[in-house]
Amino acid sequence: MARADRLAEIRPQHQHIADLVALHLNIEPEEVLEGLIDYRRHLDLIDSFLAEGGRHTLTFTYQLLSPKPMGRFVLYGDLNERDQGNTGGHSIAPKTTSANAASASP
């Protein structure tokens, strides 16, 4: 699925979450949305959070880095990992370079 297709799937609930994240990180909501549509899994996590009986938490991490050739965010963990009790356990965080990967913790 292309980024344009994922962008077309953005609902008011996604926009509201992006607005809140942007407000707390002091960035533009469009920057949050651009990261969310990088990967289908990012939208799936938010959809799970919004679903009745879904995930209970979402964690967003923001870090300024030099531009990457593609994708602004990487998802730590696998969607099937740590799902016991639907408590979450996943973070959406910017990609790290090899130089600072050793100091980054998921």
Image (tube, rainbow, N blue to C red):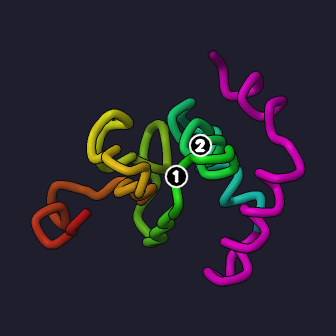
Pick the quarter of the image with the C terminus: bottom left
| Picture quadrant of residue 21 | bottom right
Tell me which residue sits at (50%, 66%) in the image.
Answer: 60
| Picture quadrant of residue 81 | top left
| Residue type pointed to by label 2 | Ser
Q: Which residue is mark 1?
A: 55
The disc at residue 91 is none
| Residue 24 as seen in the image, left or right of residue 16 | left
| Residue 92 as seen in the image, left or right of residue 19 | left
Marks 2 and 1 in Cβ contact (< 8 Å):
yes
| Residue type pointed to by label 1 | Arg
Classed neighbour count for the residue bearing mark 1: other residues with Cα under 10 Å, few (<14), some (14–19), many (≥20)? many
Judge by depth and name the residue closer to the eye, 10 or 63.
10
Tell me which residue sits at (49%, 41%) in the image.
Answer: 71
Q: Please, what secondary structure does the residue beneath circle 1 have?
A: loop
| Picture quadrant of residue 90 | bottom left
Pick the quarter of the image with the N terminus: top right
Q: Position of residue 17 (x, y in %)?
A: 73, 62
Q: Which residues are magenta?
A: 1-28
